Image (tube, helix red, strand yellow):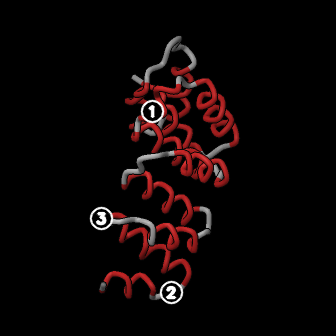
């Protein structure tokens, strides 16, 4: 039900339903983080922080959940908590890098997105698009030079 609300642009209803769930699993928490990211509000950010703090440690190895958490931090403007979380993730998948790069771009920190790109061993097309967006934000042709390599 939460997913249906979220997918139909009713993030507030998804969040309201979350409060009725006594023991949310990883999927429910991921949907909650996505809903809060969609709202981009301080209230959403506060809920994300609260749920993250109470979340079982075992959930913190789920790359989908961590990616949605990073995305929520970034979309709510909390770059410092996103960076702190990013540094704690031991095995970073491309989606984690992508969430960070996109967050940097959305928060007008394209230089950080470009710096992060240089740390990615095997970037995919999505990562290159994020690189190009970063360079466009800065008015730089670095992305084209890197793509030629």
Local SS, label 3: loop
Image point 58% across, 46% down: which residue? 85
Sooner in the amino-acid sequence: mark 2 or mark 1: 1
Q: Residues within 10 Å of mark 1 (few under 14, many from 20)?
A: many
* Discs 3, 2 touching: Cβ within 8 Å: no
Check disc 2: other Cα within 10 Å, few if <14, some if 14-19, many if 20+.
few
Residue to which mark 3 is pinned: 124
Q: Whole-Å distance between the Cαs marked 2 and 1?
A: 36 Å
Question: In this view of the protein, which residue sits in the foreground, 2 or 102?
Answer: 102
**Quadrant housing residue 62:** top left
- Sequence-wise, the earlier of marks 3 and 2 is 3
Mark drawn on residue 140: 2
Residue at the outermost front position: 90
- Name the front one of labels 3 and 1: 3
Q: Quadrant of the C terminus?
A: bottom left
Name, please, the residue furthest toward the top.
Answer: 22
Residue 45: x and y in percent read: 65, 40
């Amino acid at each position: 039900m939460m997913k249906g609300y979220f997918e139909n642009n009713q993030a507030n209803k998804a969040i309201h339903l979350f409060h009725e769930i006594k023991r949310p699993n990883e999927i429910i928490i991921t949907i909650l983080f996505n809903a809060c990211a969609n709202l981009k509000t301080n209230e959403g950010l506060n809920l994300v922080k609260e749920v993250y703090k109470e979340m079982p440690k075992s959930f913190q190895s789920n790359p989908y959940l961590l990616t949605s958490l990073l995305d929520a931090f970034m979309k709510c403007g909390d770059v410092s908590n996103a960076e702190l979380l990013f540094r704690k993730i031991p095995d970073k998948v491309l989606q984690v890098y992508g969430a960070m790069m996109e967050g940097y771009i959305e928060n007008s920190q394209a230089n950080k997105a470009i710096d992060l790109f240089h740390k990615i061993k095997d970037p995919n097309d999505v990562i290159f698009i994020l690189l190009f967006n970063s360079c466009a934000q800065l008015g730089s042709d670095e992305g084209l030079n890197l793509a030629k390599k």
